[in-house]
């Protein structure tokens, strides 16, 4: 008997296997008609922190903190002998940050 050995070629059936698997997946798995249940409060929160009022308040806060640091530096330059080295180092770190 003369039998031919069949060789398995791994790449031959891959497209057919993918097509069969995709046909077995239910149609509703691909549907995205609405938001997820937890997204309603998340969207409300994102709209609350990205408006014009929060941006304005953050800019005012940054400017106010900068002015306070400049005022503290001026006071340190005026009263240089009364401020200890630790406080000067702490303010220098704050200014670098």
Image (cartoon, helix red, strand yellow):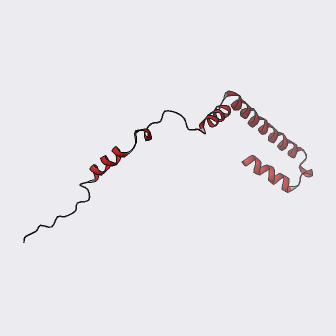
Residue sitting farthest toward the bottom: 1
Q: Nearer the viewer, residue 2 or 13?
A: 2
Q: Residue at x 54, y 35 (%)?
A: 35
Q: Nearer the viewer, residue 80 or 11?
A: 11
Report whether 19 appears left or right of 45. Answer: left
Does 71 appear above or below 92?
Answer: above
Q: Position of residue 75 (x, y in %)?
A: 87, 43
The residue drawn where x is 85% and y is 56% is 85
User: As drawn, is 71 to the left or to the right of 7?
Assistant: right
Query: In the picture, which quadrant includes the N terminus?
Result: bottom left
Q: Residue furthest left?
A: 1
Badge count? 0
Q: Residue at x 91, y 46 (%)?
A: 79
Residue at the farthest top position: 52
**Image coords of residue 50 (percent x, y):** 65, 32
Residue positioned 63% across, 37% down in the render: 42
Q: Which residue of the protein is positioned furthest toward the right in this rendering?
A: 82
Task: Indicate whether 66 appears above or below 91.
Answer: above
Point out residue 16 in the picture as x, y percentages from the top left corner. Answer: 27, 49
- In the drawing, does residue 30 fall left or right of residue 64? left
């Amino acid at each position: 008997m003369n039998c031919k050995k069949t060789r398995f070629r791994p790449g031959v059936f891959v497209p057919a296997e993918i097509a069969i698997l995709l046909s077995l997946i239910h149609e509703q798995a691909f549907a995205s008609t609405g938001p997820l249940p937890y997204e309603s409060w998340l969207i409300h929160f994102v709209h609350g922190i990205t408006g014009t009022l929060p941006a304005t308040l953050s800019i005012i806060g940054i400017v106010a903190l900068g002015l306070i640091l400049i005022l503290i530096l001026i006071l340190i330059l005026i009263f240089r002998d009364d401020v200890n080295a630790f406080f000067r180092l702490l303010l220098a770190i704050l200014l670098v940050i």
